[in-house]
Amino acid sequence: MPELSPEILAKYEPVIGLELHAQLLTDTKAFCSCKAGYSDIPNATVCPICLGHPGTLPVVNRRHVEMAVLLGLATKCSIRPISAFARKNYFYPDLSKGYQITQFNDPICYEGSVTIEMEEGLMKEIGITRIHIEEDAGKSLHDIDIDTLVDFNRAGMPLLEIVSEPDLRSASEAYRYMVTMRQLVRYLGVCDGNLEEGSLRCDANVSVRLRGNSAFGTKTEIKNLNSFRNVEKAIAYEIERHIALIESGGQVQQVTMQWDASSQCTKEMRSKEQAHDYRYFQEPDLGYVRVNQEMIEMQQSHLPELPLAMKLRLQDQYGIPGYDAGILIEDKQLALFFENTCAELAIQNNERYKFVSNWILTEILKILSDKKIGISQAENIQPRGIAEIVDLFADEKISSKIAKEVFAEYLQSGISPVDYVAEKGLLQISDRTEIERIVLSALEGEEDNIAKYRSGKNNLLGYFISKVMKSSGGKANPRLVNELLTHYLQ
Ligand code: ADP
Ligand code: ZN
Ligand code: MG
C-alpha cells in the first residue's frame, strides 16, 4: 500500500461501527442444561439439544435473559417487553443444527448509548443500536490433524451481540470503545472479557468519507479481532486502504476482511456476492422472551456503580488525578482496595489518599504483574497494612526508603508495619538538634568539598545528603537534612 501524506489522510473522515459478541458467565448453556464453563476435553459438555438432534426442544435460560436486561440497562437501552427468537440458517461443520438461534427484527435491547472518555475529561457518547440474545456455534480446529476437527463444547454457549451505531471516528476511538465495553461487562459480572480466549469477540465495520460529506462511504467488515492492539491496528490499516483506493480512482467494494497478524494487513475473506442469505424466520420451537417490570426492577437493583462513574467519583472524592483513577478502576477490586485502604488511614486528607494511590500504582502493581495475579489473590496485601505504611510516611515517622523496607517485611511475615518500625527502632529522626549534630559531624574533614560546593559545584549537595543519610542509618528526616545542610553549606 502506498504511503499517504498527512494532507491526504486529513481529507477523509473514518466511520466505524463495532459488533461485539460477549460470552456470558452463566452456569449452563443457552438452551439446554449443559455446563457452560470451559472444558479441556473436546465434546465433553454436549447433549442432544445443543447438538441439534431431531426431536429435541430448546428451553430459554432465564439467566441469559437477565444478563441481557442488565447490560441493556447499563447501556441506557430500551428493553422490549416481548421479543422473538429467530433461526439464522447456514451450513458449516461446526454448526450441527444447520442454524443458529438468535434474534433478528426485535432484539431484546435497543437504542442505548455508552460514554467513552477519549482524553482526560473529554467524553463522547457512542450509540448502541441493539443488544440481542443468541447462541454460539461449535469450534472448527484446522491445525491439529490433517482433517478439520470439530469441538462442540462451545455450541449453544450463551452470547449477547452488542451492535454499535457507526459513531466512532478513528481507530483510537474504536479502541477506547472496546476497552470501555470490556470494563463494563466485567463490572456487571456478565462476561470475563477475555479477547485472546474469545470470550469477547469483535468485528469492525469501517468506511471513509470526504470530510463535510453527510453520506457514508461503502463499508468493509473485519472479522474476529482477538486483541485490543489488533482491533486498533486492523482498523487503522483498513482506513488507509480505503483512502488509497479512492485516491487512486478506485471504489471500495463491500467485502468481508480478515486481519492477518503475521503480515500486519487485512485480507479479503469473501465478497458481497458470496454473502450469506440466512433465510431468517421465527424460531418455532421457542415462545417469546417476556421481560416484565419486576425483572427490570430486579436487574436495576443489581446494577453496580459503572466504571466511568466510579473513576469520576474517585477523582472527586479523593482528589486523585484522572490518570491514577483510570488505572485503579481498570480492575474493580483494585479500586475497592484503594477505597478500603483510604478508609483505614488515621488522618483523612487528599495528601494521604494520593500517597495510597502512589503506593498501589508503583509498589503493589509491580508485585501483582510479576505474579500475574489480581489484588484479591494477593492475601498478604491488606488495606490495614498499606494504610499503616502510608500513615507512618505521611507523619514523617519513616522515610520512603524505610517505607520500602517495611513493606518488604510486611509482605514476607505479615507483621504490622507500626509494630515492625517500633521493634526495629526504624522511626525516622525528626529531632532538629540531633540531625544538626549528624550534619555537623558529617561535614567534619570535608573542607575541600565544602569549598568546591561554595565555588559553584552544586551537585555536591547530593554527596553530602547521602553521607548524612548513611550515618543516620537511613533514618534522618530527608526534609530536615536538606534544610540543615543547605544552611551550613552557605
Ligand atoms: P449489515 O446489514 O451489513 O449487517 P448493519 O447496518 O447491520 O450492516 O451494521 C452493522 C455494523 O456496521 C454496525 O455496527 C454499524 O454501526 C456499522 N456500519 C453500518 N454502516 C456503516 C458504514 N457506512 N461505515 C462504517 N460502519 C458502518
Ligand atoms: Zn447441551
Ligand atoms: Mg447487521
Image (cartoon, rainbow, N blue to C red):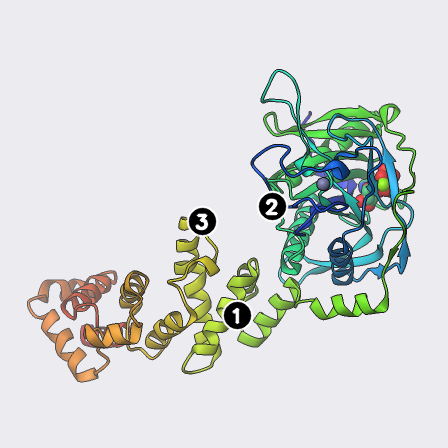
* Residue 372 - label: 3
338 shown above or below 191: below
Q: Position of residue 129 (x, y in %)?
A: 84, 51
Q: Residues within 10 Å of mark 1 (few under 14, many from 20)?
A: many
Q: CA distance from mark 2 to mark 3?
A: 15 Å
> Is residue 27 or residue 292 the one in the foreground?
27
| Residue occupied by mark 1 | 320
Question: Who's the residue at 80% across and 66% down the image?
Answer: 296
Q: Are marks 1 and 3 in contact (CB under 8 Å)?
A: no
Asked whether the viewer can see residue 216, the reply is no
Residue farthest to the left?
A: 445
Question: Who's the residue at 26% across and 76% down the image?
Answer: 419
Q: Element under label 3?
A: loop
Question: Who's the residue at 92% across and 33% down the image?
Answer: 279
Q: Give the quarter the ligand 1 occupies.
A: top right
The C terminus: image quadrant? bottom left
Q: Are marks 2 and 1 in contact (CB under 8 Å)?
A: no
Return the disc, 2 or 1, that comes first in the chain's sequence.
Answer: 2
| Residue occupied by mark 2 | 194
Q: Nearer the viewer, mark 2 or mark 1?
A: 2
Question: Who's the residue at 41% across and 50% down the image?
Answer: 371
- Residue 324 relative to residue 96: left or right: left
Q: Position of residue 99 (x, y in %)?
A: 83, 34
